[in-house]
Amino acid sequence: MLKNESTEKAYSMETIREKHKNAYMPRTNEDDERLELLYCEKTPLEELSSIFGRNAGAIQSRINKLQLKEKYDF
């Protein structure tokens, strides 16, 4: 096995959750409703990340999945 082909991950959920407490946790309908409301209020992505305890990429992915840009056409 080559050096870069390690079977161990370069990170762990525990390490990620030190910075983003809800990383990899299931989302709730309440979270989605709150995200939609805050999105409509034009809350910055970095603030949404802090509010939901997830990284900005996860928030952006959820915005895309819920089609909030298309729904509200900002």
Image (cartoon, rainbow, N blue to C red):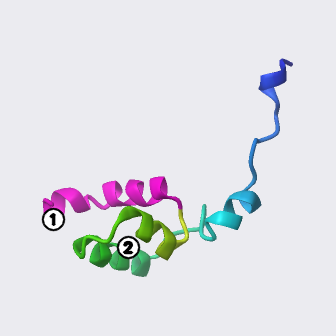
Q: Looking at the figure, which quarter contains the C terminus? A: bottom left
Q: Residue furthest left?
A: 73
Q: Looking at the figure, which quarter contains the N terminus? A: top right
Q: Which residues are magenta?
A: 55-74
* Towards the viewer: 43 or 35: 43
Most frequent secondary structure within the magenta stretch? helix
- Residue visible at 36% across and 73% down? 35
Mark 2, other Cα within 10 Å: few <14 / some 14–19 / many ≥20: some
> Residue 66 sits in which quadrant?
bottom left
* Towards the viewer: 65 or 3: 3
| Residue for badge 2 | 32
Q: Position of residue 8 (x, y in %)?
A: 82, 39
Question: Dot 2: what SS?
Answer: helix
Horizontal arrangement in the rendering, residue 45 relative to residue 19 (left or right):
left
| Label 1 vs 2, first from the N-terminus | 2
Horizontal arrangement in the rendering, residue 46 relative to residue 22 (left or right):
left
Q: Residue 63: say if magenta.
A: yes
> Residue 68 sits in which quadrant?
bottom left
Horizontal arrangement in the rendering, residue 31 relative to residue 69 (left or right):
right
Q: Position of residue 65 (x, y in %)?
A: 34, 56
Question: Dot 1: what SS?
Answer: helix
Report, in whole angstroms, how far the alpha carbon at label 1 lies from the one at label 2.
15 Å
> Residue 26 sits in which quadrant?
bottom right
| Residue for badge 1 | 72
* Towards the viewer: 43 or 61: 43
Q: Which mark is residue 28?
A: none
Q: Residue 69: say if magenta.
A: yes
Three-letter code for the amino acid on which mark 1 is drawn: Tyr
Three-letter code for the amino acid on which mark 2 is drawn: Asp
